[in-house]
Amino acid sequence: MARLGMLIDLNTCIGCHACSVACKAEFDVPLGSFRDTVKYVEDGAYPNATRHFIPVLCNHCEDAPCLNACPTGAVVRLDDGEITIDEGDCNLNRFCMSACPYGAIYVDEDKSAAQKCTFCQHRTEEGRQPACVDACPTGCRIFGDLDDPDSKIAKKAARSETRSWKEEKGTRPRVLYIDPRGALDLIADEGVQVDTSGEMSGD
């Protein structure tokens, strides 16, 4: 069975938001909520200031806090590792939201359920790529089987130095980054949802 994951090369992200727009369109995500977005972070001071573009999404963690926190069984891990939320079993207790250190989960009022990135499970089960990957004009996102040594993602991960967001949380994310300038350290206290930076678990 495949172990699906994503590799994001911050060297080639240009902050265009094609990924987040594609995601919004794919899932009709409510205004103010995000399955996928791009953080803009300024670093340094003139004349050596730098702007970083950092795509963020659910990390589909090996040790997913949301999976353990959900009392209704609505949060499930598929055989290939994708973590999804069964709308019919979700009673909006928000335990998953509190448990996620990445602020990746939001409430969809229209569906009366918690929602988040699913790696576009409805697309990947048909052999297609997630919408964000297809939309990226620079190819900074690679999606595939982390355990297949012949896959594009495994080959690039093997020849690159990779890291994950908030490694100290010990969740073992399946979203990996090539981050030579340490940009992830600049959003250590932030989350995917723009208004939850002060509410991350452990802060």
Image (spheres, rainbow, N blue to C red):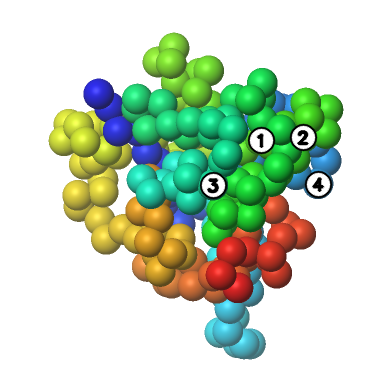
Residue 54 x %, y %: 55, 58
Which residue is disc 4 drawn over? 32
- Graded by Cα atoms within 10 Å as few (under 14), some (14 to 19) or many (20 or more), the crowding at tag 1 reads many
Q: Quadrant of the C terminus?
A: bottom right
Q: Gap between marks 1 and 2, in whole Å?
A: 6 Å
Q: Amino acid at mark 2?
A: Asp
Where disc 4 sits, the SS reads loop
Where disc 1 sits, the SS reads strand
Q: Amino acid at mark 1?
A: Gln
Q: Mark 1 or mark 4, which is nearer to you?
A: 1
Q: Mark 4 or mark 2, which is nearer to you?
A: 2
Q: Earlier along the polypeptide chain: callout 3 or callout 2?
A: 3
Residue 67 x %, y %: 49, 41
Q: Residue placed at 69% from the left, 36% from the top?
A: 114
Q: Is residue 143 above or below residue 175?
A: above
Which residue is disc 1 drawn over? 115
Marks 4 and 2 close (CB-CB < 8 Å): no
Which residue is disc 2 drawn over? 108
Where disc 2 sits, the SS reads strand
Q: Residue placed at 16% from the left, 35% from the top?
A: 149
Q: Amino acid at mark 4?
A: Gly
Q: Gap between marks 3 and 2, in whole Å?
A: 19 Å
Q: Gap between marks 3 and 1, in whole Å?
A: 15 Å
Please indicate whether residue 197 sits to the left or right of residue 11 in the image.
Answer: right
- Graded by Cα atoms within 10 Å as few (under 14), some (14 to 19) or many (20 or more), the crowding at tag 4 reads few
Residue 103 x %, y %: 62, 54
Q: Mark 3 or mark 1, which is nearer to you?
A: 3
Q: Amino acid at mark 3?
A: Ala
Q: Earlier along the polypeptide chain: callout 1 or callout 2?
A: 2
Q: Earlier along the polypeptide chain: callout 1 or callout 4?
A: 4
Q: Nearer the viewer, residue 41 or 146?
A: 146
